[in-house]
Amino acid sequence: RTVYAQETIDSVCPFCGVGCLTSVSVKDGKIVKVDGRNGPANENRLCVKGRFGFDYVSNPERLTVPLIRRADAPKDPNFALTFENRFEVFREASWDEALERAAGGLKAAHDRKGGAGIAGFGSAKGSNEEAYLFQKLIRQGFGTNNVDHCTRLCHASSVAALMEGIGSGAVTAPFTAAEDADCMIVIGARPEQNHPVAATYIKQAAKKGTKLIVMDPRGQGLMRHADYGLKFKPGTDVAMLNAILNVIVTERLYDEQYIAAHVDGFEALKVKIAAFTPEAMEPVCGIDAETLRQVARLYATSAKSIIFWGMGVSQHVHGTDNVRCLIAMALTTGQIGRPGTGLHPLRGQNNVQGASDAGLIPMVFPDYRSVENPDIRAEFEDAWGRTLDPVRGLTVVEIMNDILADGIEAMYIMGENPAMSDPDQTHARKALATLKHLVVQDIFLTETAWHADVILPASAHAEKLGTYTNTNRQVQIGRPAVSLPGEAREDWRIIVDLAARLGLAWAYDGVPDVYEEMRGHMTSLDNISWERLENEGSVTYPAEAFDKPGSEILFGQSFPTADGRARIVPTDLVPPDEVPDADFPMVLTTGRMLEHWHTGAMTRRATVLDAIEPEPVVSMNPHDIKRQGFDIGQQVTVETRRGTITLTLRADRDVSEGMLFVPFCFFEAPANFLTNPQLDPFGKIPEFKFCAARIRSA
Ligand code: SF4
């Protein structure tokens, strides 16, 4: 194990998909400071998480020794394990014993049920190399495509619509393209909280005169900088966007030449959106018809318009339809493929783009190549020396359902926390507790680790080498700054160690070796060698040549579809799965907050961040608070048909009347005990952004 003696180490932020480059200062083996570097996505900037969220790495609750469940410790989904009481359930073990036990349980399930008995969740917080190795282990080791990660819970619907419409799931332009735009739409995203450095580019552009349209059922700070702030009714995205498309068509604001040259499906769109007049949609979406017309004209007639969106768009049962509408707007108006134009789903986790690119999803091998295509499968069968599963695997929520239907018996989970992030936690935790064998590889005793049979102590971002791909398609190197604690190991090494116990003949000299093997299966990484990354620090894919910068703007001339043309897919109104009624009269929506990252495993253990936001809160409009007789700061119970949690009531004018907002980072009151597991049929993403709820004094 190497101890790095440098005082500052060049790395990349471990939190959001912006991918800010950092300088990590180390003293006496501990990180003491993180500064921004001049990266292409941050130009020296950092947000509060990147700057102050580092001391989780040295938190005393880090896992340092492998743990094995005691024979007399039954799996109780309701048992609240803590770091202090962990030895009531687990005992310490050597790596040899833990790896043997981990591999043995997985093999036993495979012997009983074949690939159908196994599933794996990799991590969007791990590196590209870890993602690649993880999906390879599941596919090669067990002959199943049951491998997924949290992209299923964030932008799976965006990727489904983008693949269908333009043949690629990645962004067509970086968020820094805001600087070149004349008009920006930000819909269902709160970049000030969730992509704070990206928000600075959007705000700067707005300040310089770029028109800004913000669409969000909750108000947000970005609306202060906006020319139009559309607080539409939750769950009515398609009504609002189809009304905008109706104006684009009826007022002939579309680009006839562009459509003729590049786009199919326009005639079908014209027919479909005829009924979606702004006047007809005004009462549905809550935005007046004249505003819808003005927004449509501004977007369509600006010389360069770009659309950014987030999980407010994607996390619905109609998430794919929402994105289809955004794609249709860009394609009908030709607002794509030029500087200052395009489609940009703001990626959440630091490596959700890279993990998806590396094949950590059940439908595709690396580079989004279908597991169902025999020619593609043959390439991987040759490389990996076994027959591979010809059928797409199950997705995150489907895996939980399958466990409870006596299907999957064993899982390997690396760096993900489904016991906090999956919808309907009662169901999800029951599924985890039902597994005959669960291997968890993580840095903390997460809520998921409570249910494990074997826990493998892993590496924090600051302790390992690897590449990460941000929301802008920039591949960047994260470097180790401090040593691993105790007997913890780098994640890629653990996967390789486990592969050896499973009988797989893997041999890697190090992370660069893994990167180069992965690159051999990914034309998207052509001309981006490890050496080039070492020299340049950050390279955008695709790159045409070794000595040329990568392409920031994609699809100027053609699309990566079979015939090179893009496709509009018209959409209908699909209501939310569960609408408010007399018993549950409020709309509950969930999400993140500036100071905490996802399920809070890291940021709740970062001293500064947890001091700023230390307790679970539900936000409610002040008028609702007054009308319903609550006091700000009191304890309240929020309830849905799936569960109940108790938290502190916070007044927030940005939350519309009739709505509640609960962040999902607090283990004391997990928001996902409340959420609806109903899935979008295409992206298989759950409806985190809308369900019926009620609130009462605790
Ligand atoms: Fe890290 Fe994202 Fe903040 Fe940048 S914007 S410092 S990548 S959390």
Image: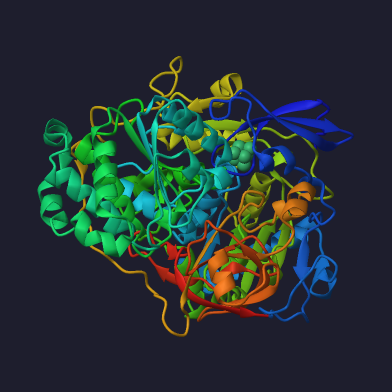
Residue 66 at what x, y percent from top left?
78, 59
Residue 529 at what x, y percent from top left?
51, 25
Is 116 displayed left or right of 644 in the figure?
left
Image height of 463 relative to 526, above or below: below
- Here the colouring is rainbow
Residue 293 at what x, y percent from top left?
24, 46
For this rendering, which residue is in front, 681 or 295? 295
Q: Residue at x 56, y 47 (%)?
A: 194
| Res. 78 in view | yes
Is 462 displayed left or right of 155 in the figure?
right
For this rendering, which residue is in front, 299 or 161? 299
Image height of 311 relative to 474, above or below: below
Q: Quadrant of residue 563?
A: top left
Residue 423 at what x, y percent from top left?
52, 69
Image height of 697 relative to 389, above or below: below
| Res. 430 in view | no
Q: Quadrant of the N terminus?
A: top right
For this rendering, which residue is in front, 171 or 294? 294
Q: Residue at x 18, y 50 (%)?
A: 246
For this rendering, which residue is in front, 287 or 575? 287
Q: Quadrant of the C terminus?
A: bottom right
